[in-house]
Image (cartoon, helix red, strand yellow):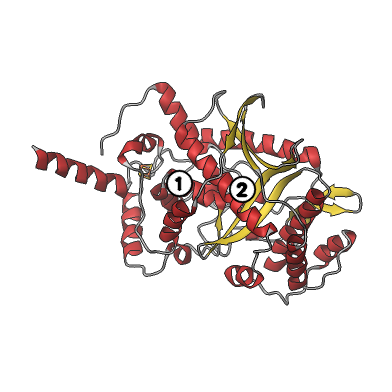
């Protein structure tokens, strides 16, 4: 497939595209948010299990949250690990292995969610999909091919996010024993978020949950605060390796991210978080007693809860009767990683995202095949780790050559 030659500047931009963080998702938020204990706000950091292990492809998409201290490979998803391989490869060279996987995938009747053992999607999954769906699939199937310079960029971005988070609260580690405990931490933090917003304060790392088109999604909003006019504003921090604003292709992903957050947050405060759906999607046990450490933190926050279901109901009631407004403004804030200076801000207009999301979800439901980038965006392939093995690219090249021959 033909691709236009890129100038050094363009190439650098492309490379940065693939590493810029989208910052959200419980798999990368590490259960570390804010739990109001007495008069202090101590974010809780779950230590106990692998629920929050990063998806490998998120490792290079997201730098926006704290990392889980757990080093356990995610038992629910053998493809998921918080650890990177000892040697990073610039390009995937495993043609045989890939061909085998490809063949297997074609004869596999399961949809991608089932195939990759995913109970839910993170909003960043949709961002990765928006960049290149084929690349996202390779990232899941062939994890660990992250270039060292990208790891360094991610680390710097993560530090800026962490410093910002620590401006408004400290972090508390909580030991969890079960999956329900791990999710309980997220709901305790959500309860804290609700009460701080109700009091008119700003919150950072606000968890959001919801079902879109039959698929469960989770995410973490960087910041919510009220403007002097009293509007509730979502502010998403993006760190950049160069002191310039991103390309339109990058911006499209960022816009989608904040629009999905708004969609989910608004649905939550309208009382549309369906507990039965949540439990069945995540396969959690509402009757599961909460661990001692979780109960201890809940009690300090003035909550009486015994089992996971108690906490879920409490969260749902708090959301429904919170009187919190919908998000009024969406803002992206771009910072230069080197010195954390502000490069610029951008206001995002909330439009209809249903059609776009339906197309993404159709992939996850197995209703259509994986797509790579369109010919107009073939420049993205230049910096892609999977360039040498990409089936989509090969197929598109064949189609283009055939079309050319037919015309001659
Ligand atoms: S080579 Fe291009 S089409 Fe293939 S995965 Fe990479 S970016 Fe996507």
Q: Secondary structure at mark 2?
A: loop
157 displayed left or right of 373 = right
Viewer-side residue, 117 vs 402: 402
The residue carrying mark 1 has its beta carbon less than 8 Å from ligand 1:
no
Q: Is residue 140 visible?
A: no
Q: Is residue 201 above or below residue 338?
A: below
Separation of residues labelled 1 and 2 (CA atoms): 15 Å
Residue under label 1: 130
Q: Is residue 304 above or below residue 12?
A: below
Disc on the earlier residue, 1 or 2: 2
Query: Which quadrant would the C terminus be assigned to in this image?
Result: top left
Residue under label 2: 24
Rendered residue at 45%/51% (across/down): 356
46 displayed left or right of 3 = right
Residue 289: x and y in percent read 77, 74
In terms of image quadrants, where is residue 343?
A: top right
247 displayed left or right of 338 = left
Residue 154: x and y in percent read 59, 37
């Amino acid at each position: 497939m033909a691709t236009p030659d890129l100038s050094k500047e363009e190439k650098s931009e492309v490379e940065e595209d693939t590493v810029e963080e989208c910052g959200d998702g419980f798999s990368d938020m590490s259960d570390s948010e804010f739990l109001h204990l007495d008069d202090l706000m101590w974010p809780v950091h779950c230590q106990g299990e692998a629920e929050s292990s990063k998806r490998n492809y998120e490792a290079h998409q997201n730098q926006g949250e704290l990392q889980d201290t757990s080093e356990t490979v995610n038992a629910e998803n053998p493809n998921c690990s918080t650890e990177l391989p000892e040697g990073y490869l610039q390009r995937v060279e495993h043609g045989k292995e890939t061909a085998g996987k490809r063949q297997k995938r074609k004869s596999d009747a399961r949809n991608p969610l089932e195939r990759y053992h995913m109970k839910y999607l993170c909003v960043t999954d949709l961002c990765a999909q928006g960049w290149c769906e084929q690349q996202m699939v390779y990232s899941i199937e062939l994890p660990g091919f992250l270039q060292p310079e990208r790891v360094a960029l991610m680390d710097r971005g993560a530090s800026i996010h962490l410093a910002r988070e620590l401006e408004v609260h400290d972090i508390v580690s909580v030991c969890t024993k079960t999956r329900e405990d791990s999710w309980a931490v997220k709901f305790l933090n959500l309860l804290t978020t609700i009460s701080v917003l109700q009091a008119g304060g700003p919150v950072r790392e606000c968890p959001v949950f919801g079902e879109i088109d039959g698929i469960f999604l989770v995410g973490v909003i960087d910041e919510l605060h009220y403007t002097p006019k009293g509007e509730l504003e979502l502010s998403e921090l993006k760190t950049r390796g160069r002191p310039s604003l991103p390309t339109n292709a990058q911006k499209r992903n960022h816009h989608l991210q904040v629009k999905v957050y708004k969609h989910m947050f608004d649905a939550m405060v309208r009382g549309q978080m369906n507990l039965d759906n949540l439990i069945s999607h995540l396969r959690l046990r509402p009757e599961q007693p909460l661990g001692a450490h979780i109960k201890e933190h809940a009690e300090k926050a003035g909550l009486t809860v015994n089992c996971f279901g108690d906490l879920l109901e409490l969260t749902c009631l708090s959301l429904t009767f919170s009187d919190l407004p919908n998000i009024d403004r969406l803002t992206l804030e771009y910072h230069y990683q080197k010195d954390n200076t502000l490069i610029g801000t951008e206001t995002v207009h909330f439009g209809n995202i249903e059609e776009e999301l339906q197309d993404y979800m159709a992939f996850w439901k197995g209703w259509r095949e994986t797509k790579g980038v369109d010919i107009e965006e073939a420049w993205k392939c230049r910096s892609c780790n999977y360039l040498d093995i990409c089936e989509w690219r090969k197929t598109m090249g064949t189609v283009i050559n055939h079309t050319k021959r037919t015309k001659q």
